[in-house]
Image: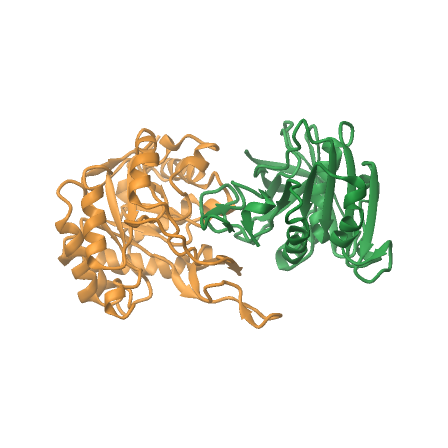
Amino acid sequence: MRELNALVLENVRIAENIYSLTFATEEPVPVRCGQFAMLGVNGFPLRRPIAICKAEGNRVTVCYQIKGAGTRTLAETYKPREHISVLLPLGNGFEVGAGQKRVAVVGGGVGIFPLVSVIRAYCAEKEIYAYMGFRSRAAVCMEYELRRGKSLVISTDDGSLGRRGTSVQAFMDEIDKIAPDVVLSCGPVPMLRALKSALSGRGIPAYASLEERMGCGIGACLVCVCDKNDGTHARVCKDGPVFDLSKIVL
Amino acid sequence: MADLSVTLAGVKLKNPVIPASGTFGFGREFAELYDLSLLGAVATKGLTLEPRQGNPTPRIAESRGVILNAVGLQNPGVERFIENDLPWLKSKTKVIANVAGSTLADYEAICARLDGLVDLIELNISCPNVKCGGMAFGIRPQDVKEVTHVSKGALKKTPLIVKLSPNVESIPANARAAEEGGADALSLVNTFTGMAIDIERRRPVLANNTGGVSGAGIKPIAVRMVYEASKAVRIPVVGMGGITCAEDAVEFFMAGAAAVQVGTQNFSDTLACPSIIGGLNDWCDRHGVGRVSELTGALKLN
């Protein structure tokens, strides 16, 4: 975990309301797939937690959706050659076990971005079956990255591209055919809830990366907790953001 | 190289910069970023006798120049703190245990349990008193005095800081009440009660509806309150509220603070406290100030 002043290399729109920001750090920062960064935005006290899509050497790419004033400022004012304050890498990230060969990745909305890092990390050694859901054709992005695995099924809520429906429906239609050893997911809570319920009783290990409003991003402030089945809380930023789907309450 | 050391209720701190309770956990996470022995002390996450789960999420919101939080005192309980975190934290820096309770007996018991184990105790009196209709202990002067007196009675070795709420009628009256109750020092301000609304959903952003406002935007109010408190009492005052840089800290010293706490800025910049310590030294050197303690109360009114 490092507090750095990084150099913006690129900050471009890649889909409706979605931007891709690449920055360079002075020294390479080792990043595991599914980890995230806290990005400082001038004039806003809270940093924005954003999933890391790609990390190659000292170049890190994050993708984010414009949700409010902070992310709008991030998109509009952080041009190449500007500096940005970043804290990274944060969180536990996704890990695929040695014995898990067939990996299903199920994403929805901005939840696809941490899964891009999973596909990049494991596409050479695992069979990756990707199911990615978007609101509509205009929101679809990073197709090239998502296609690095064995297969990709795109779905849109309005049917304007790929299948009509959700990525969970697309995945469940093929689950018996692909027989995954593990399922990795990220997306809105209703999507994760649907996935959890669809997988219940099947005995397939499943992990989900959660999103929550954060304070410090490093586990100190206890702002971003989630409920676990045993009645205790876990910190999304430090104990997560990736959790065993069967052990959390959504 | 200025002398940054200060003495607070008989406890010598190597410098006057303390991460504020609730923004720093028990220090372990920030220790991954810098050496905690750089700090004057650490004010721990608020502790209660029993573990507490805290409030539902979202627990944090942002508004211009400020944040709001409603964590709700989630903590592992004082016993687990003593067992798992205190020995480690004590090996790094001075420890200020921030404590809270729902009854006078809670305050008495937690103070008794921590007496002699930590360097200072900071009493969070902004919690609802369950035996008094849920009104916070820190609102009325007579309640401030009582909770201070009961807590002080349980402390034979460790000095007591009373952390004042700003959501009160009179800061001087409450400051004096804490002093009369036996406080060895005061700290202020705790957060201001506020609300942020998600206008699309027509609902408060925080699950708890209201939360405590902190951050740079509250600083002028906090400086005024620290000034008022320090004028009202003879015991030392620890100032906080929106400090983001060394110059902000200097304002609090001039207003009467003997030391400062830094809270929300730890979220904006994890290295805020070491930066402020370095900046204080530079500021003192540039201004020919040999000892930072000379600045306390150096304000000249117009």
Side of B76 relative to A1 (left or right): left
Side of B8 relative to B69 (left or right): left
**Which hue belongs to chain B?**
orange
Side of A19 relative to B185 (left or right): right
Colour basis? by chain
The image quadrant of residue A116 is top right
Up-down relation of residue B188 to residue A84 (above or below)? below
Side of B129 relative to B265 (left or right): left
Q: Residue at x 72, y 53 (%)?
A: A109
Residue B171 location, x and y as percent?
Answer: 26, 63
Q: Nearer the viewer, residue A97 or B264?
A: A97
In the rendered image, which quarter contains the C terminus of chain B?
bottom left
The image quadrant of residue B44 is top left
Give the number of callouts.
0
Residue projecting furthest to the front: A201
Residue B4 seen: no
Q: Residue at x 29, y 44 (%)?
A: B78
Residue A32 location, x and y as percent?
Answer: 64, 32
Residue B218 location, x and y as percent?
Answer: 42, 59
Chain letter of the green region? A
Residue projecting furthest to the right: A161
In the rendered image, which quarter contains the N terminus of chain B?
top left
Q: Nearer the viewer, residue A133 or A247?
A: A247
Residue B170 location, x and y as percent?
Answer: 26, 67
Residue A173 seen: yes
Up-down relation of residue A128 to residue B71 (above or below)? above
Up-down relation of residue A79 to residue A3 (above or below)? below
